[in-house]
DNA sequence: ATATTGTTTGACTAATATTGACTTTCATTA
DNA sequence: TAATGAAAGTCAATATTAGTCAAACAATAT
């Protein structure tokens, strides 16, 4: 899988560093400079690729000596991540974000690959196939919420 | 066997490449350009010739650096059960009958207990939670049909 | 011949990425 | 304390892809 745009490249750059450490602190302007892009591109990358369902928490500070800190979520037990994800989903969730939720469950080893793929199939746009996006997102949310509930009990 | 039309030609072009590699990534516009056709023709070729029953899975991304990825999958040997169940489900199925379908899959060892339970969760009445039973049964059917299709892929 | 099925085309839609002007926050200095 | 400057944040405009759908057209089957 190649990098095809700046956002992907920056994403991988940051995740490479995070592979070795629990968290990193960056200066937005420096990273932007390094990749020859506008600073707000860094915000875009973070907003789309370092979300809670992706397993990251981001904090930042403005002003002199400002920074952006990206930390991997390291949950003590599975209940926490299930709570986090349940809150994140709410009563409606898009296909893209739903995908991230399932991926997160896979990365946390709460689902095998096959289980993840099967669930992804059930919340796929083509599967649900509603004309109303509102309805589609609501059903997707209900399915995922109930899956999370199911995962709370062993087997 | 001759190539009679552009769709066949594009199909063979892609499958030739796939003979050497497990997956390919294309830019829709480039392939369209190469064969001097409209971009949506590529969608047509993919939709009609690179389906899961045909042994392919397709993913794509829009926007800058977008792509279409086609990957070969290994199909399971015996698809009779899947065919039968697909026919049985049709375009609408009740919760009770849906349960039976999933149970069959478990008994045929196409699903583990946990996988079966997860799927049962997604087609549960409480999960889908529609006021219209018609709609509920239709969505349940779509979910199960797509699950069956997914199960043709051994991974 | 006609009906059915498959193909081609293009206008419209949707998703994702990029950019930059403007805003907000915070530390430091006058 | 007020003013200044140095960060990061927000948001909307624009650009760059791919997807959808239905009408027109072509091929095949009845």
Image: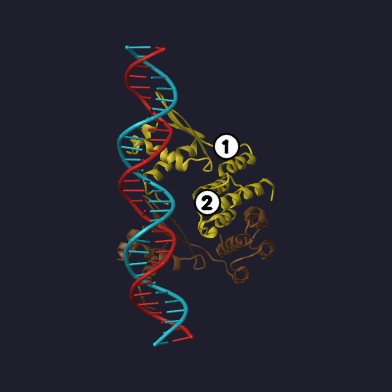
Chain colours: A yellow, B brown, C cyan, D red
> Can you say which quadrant of the picture contains the N terminus of chain B?
bottom left
* Left-right relation of A123 to B107: left
Q: Closer to the camera, C24 or A121?
A: C24
Q: Compared with residue A29, is residue B113 higher up or lower down, i.e. above or below?
A: below
* Left-right relation of B114 to A48: right
Q: Position of residue A118 (x, y in %)?
A: 58, 57
Residue B10 shows in the view: yes
| Residue A63 sits in quarter | top left
Q: Position of residue B93 (x, y in %)?
A: 64, 65
Question: Residue, x 58% and y 53% (percent of image)?
Answer: A139
Q: Closer to the camera, B75 or A43?
A: A43
The local crowd at label 1, few if under 14, some if 14 to 19, many if 20 or more residues have their Cα within 10 Å, is few
Q: Are marks 2 and 1 on the same chain?
A: yes
The local crowd at label 2, few if under 14, some if 14 to 19, many if 20 or more residues have their Cα within 10 Å, is few
Q: Which residue is mark 2?
A: A134
Q: Compared with residue A84, is residue C5 higher up or lower down, i.e. above or below?
A: below
| Residue D1 sits in quarter | top left
Name the chain under label 2: A
Q: Position of residue A99 (x, y in %)?
A: 52, 50
| Residue B125 sits in quarter | bottom right
Q: Compared with residue A82, is residue A69 higher up or lower down, i.e. above or below?
A: above
């Amino acid at each position: 899988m190649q990098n095809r745009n700046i956002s992907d490249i920056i994403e991988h750059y940051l995740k490479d560093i995070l592979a070795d450490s629990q968290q990193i602190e960056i200066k937005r302007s420096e990273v932007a400079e390094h990749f020859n892009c506008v600073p707000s591109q860094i915000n875009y990358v973070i907003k789309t690729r370092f979300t809670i369902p992706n397993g990251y928490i981001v904090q930042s500070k403005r002003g002199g000596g400002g920074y952006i800190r990206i930390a991997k979520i390291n949950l003590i037990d599975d209940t926490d991540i299930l709570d986090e994800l349940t809150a994140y989903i709410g009563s409606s969730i898009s296909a893209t974000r739903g995908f991230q939720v399932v991926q997160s469950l896979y990365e946390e080893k709460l689902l095998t690959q096959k289980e993840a793929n099967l669930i992804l199939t059930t919340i796929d746009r083509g599967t649900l196939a509603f004309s109303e996006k509102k309805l589609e997102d609501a059903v997707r949310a209900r399915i995922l919420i109930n899956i999370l509930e199911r995962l709370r009990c062993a087997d």
